[in-house]
Amino acid sequence: MENSVVMVTGGAGFVGSHLVESLLNNGNKVYVFDVIPLEQARNLHEVRNHENLHYFVGDLRKQEDIEQFWQKDASVIFHLASVVGIRHYIADPLSLVDIVVIGTRHILTAAAKYNTKVVFSSTSEIYGKNPEVPWSEESDRVLGPTYVDRWSYATSKAVCEHMLYGMKKQCGLPFVIVRFFNVYGPRQNPDFVVSQSIYKAMRGEQPLLYDDGKTTRCFTFVEDIVRGLMLVAGSPEANGQAFNLGNSVEVNMRYVIETILEKTCSKSGYQEFNTGKEYGKQYEDIIRRIPKVEKAEERLGWRAEIQLEEGLLRTIDWVRENQWWLEQGESVKG
Ligand SMILES: NC(=O)c1ccc[n+]([C@@H]2O[C@H](COP(=O)([O-])OP(=O)(O)OC[C@H]3O[C@@H](n4cnc5c(N)ncnc54)[C@H](O)[C@@H]3O)[C@@H](O)[C@H]2O)c1
């Protein structure tokens, strides 16, 4: 993706800011839409004065904001803006549904009007608690009851995917769905398991070891994700398809926490955290979350290249050079 006009929603966020930087480095003219004003968008600090960065403050829930922002000559919109993080789904599932479902509907209406390709960031959560791992893009979605708020995120993202397939049928809208698996890396808000554990360890606090550390995940470094986003945007073969973007290496959380403690040279140890006791039925954690990665590999030539140990080191090195990140408040326990 080079020398094009591109739009990014959620460009002030974690993944979005890395994507924006990469797009700018490749000579693209980048139009960002986010609800956070640029002065407060710490993640875009390094590029905020870049001549090819154009920033628009707006709310996805307002169609008029999206209409004003839209660039008719853009080749693609990366739609990343969303509510992210389990505490939000539990605290306010209605806002989550509004922002993800209504917001995405607004984006798709504009995209259909101007025939702009949409790259939609979906999630591994979409497969819910399907015990048959690894999950291929065709795997079933196995979700819990609707009174358990944590499923509002997976359900909302799935509704967006349905809208995309529907739009393709109705008006031939070009799109690609990418389902991320546990992204981590520099600048991630310290609300998520890797970022929070690094944050705590580097402040001399104790990272939390959830439920004895038996849960496993496939952590994907943000740089791999950005490469995947650029690839799908430029690949005609990806059109109308969904792709898992995830690392195929499964690690348990005990290993992750111990590696973080070791690499940060922390002596604090960890604190046991029982999710059932703290969150009750609302939590419903997914024990194993593993992608099948063959589709992205065969059709796009994409594979996660940065393994956890290297990604952790790179994140920790970045934190050492960016003390502001350690000085921000941690907004959540657990
Ligand atoms: N980080 C992960 O591990 C992960 C995993 C799976 C999927 N995803 C998806 O990737 C995308 C990016 O995630 P992230 O980790 O960068 O999240 P993030 O929270 O860092 O970024 C999301 C951005 O969306 C913006 N936003 C929220 N509500 C908005 C609204 N109403 N109008 C306009 N902007 C709004 C926020 O201000 C923020 O800058 C999301 O769509 C998320 O669902 C992320």
Image (spheres, rainbow, N blue to C red):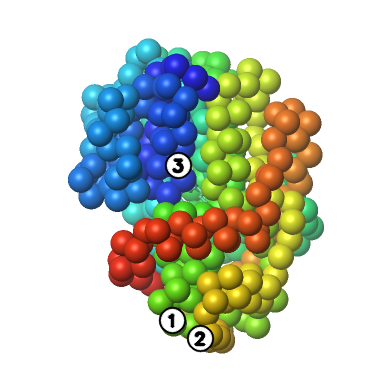
Task: Bin the neighbour count of mark 3 within 10 Å (Cα to Cα): few under 14, some 14-19, many 20 and up.
Answer: many
Q: Which residue is disc 1 drawn over?
A: 204
List the residue tagged with mark 2. 268
Element on which disc 3 rests? helix
Label located before the other in sequence (3 or 1) = 3
Closer-to-camera residue (108/220): 220
Say which of marks 3 and 1 sits in front: 1
For label 3, the residue is 18
Q: Nearer the viewer, residue 190 or 130?
A: 190
Picture coordinates of residue 19 (x, y %)? 46, 37
Q: Which residue appears at 64% of the width and 66% of the height?
A: 286
Mark 2 is on which residue type? Ser
Q: Quadrant of residue 320?
A: bottom left
Residue 58, position as x, y percentages in the image: 24, 38
Q: CA distance from mark 1 to mark 2?
A: 6 Å
Please tell me whether mark 2 sits on a helix, a strand or a loop.
loop
Mark 1 secondary-structure assignment: loop
Q: Residue at x 23, y 29 (%)?
A: 64
Q: Does the CB distance between marks 1 and 2 fall below 8 Å?
A: yes
Q: Earlier in the sequence, mark 1 or mark 2?
A: 1
Q: Left or right: 240 with respect to 35?
A: right
The answer to which quarter of the image holds residue 311 is: bottom right
Q: Is residue 131 visible?
A: yes
On residue 223, which mark appears? Answer: none
Q: Are marks 3 and 2 in contact (CB under 8 Å)?
A: no
Badge 2, how many Cα within 10 Å: few under 14, some, many 20+?
some
Name the amino acid, label 3.
His
93 vs 265, nearest the viewer: 265
Q: In the rendered view, does 21 fall on the left or right side of 56?
A: right
Whether residue 137 appears in this view of the structure is: no
| Distance Cα–Cα, label 3 vs label 2 | 31 Å
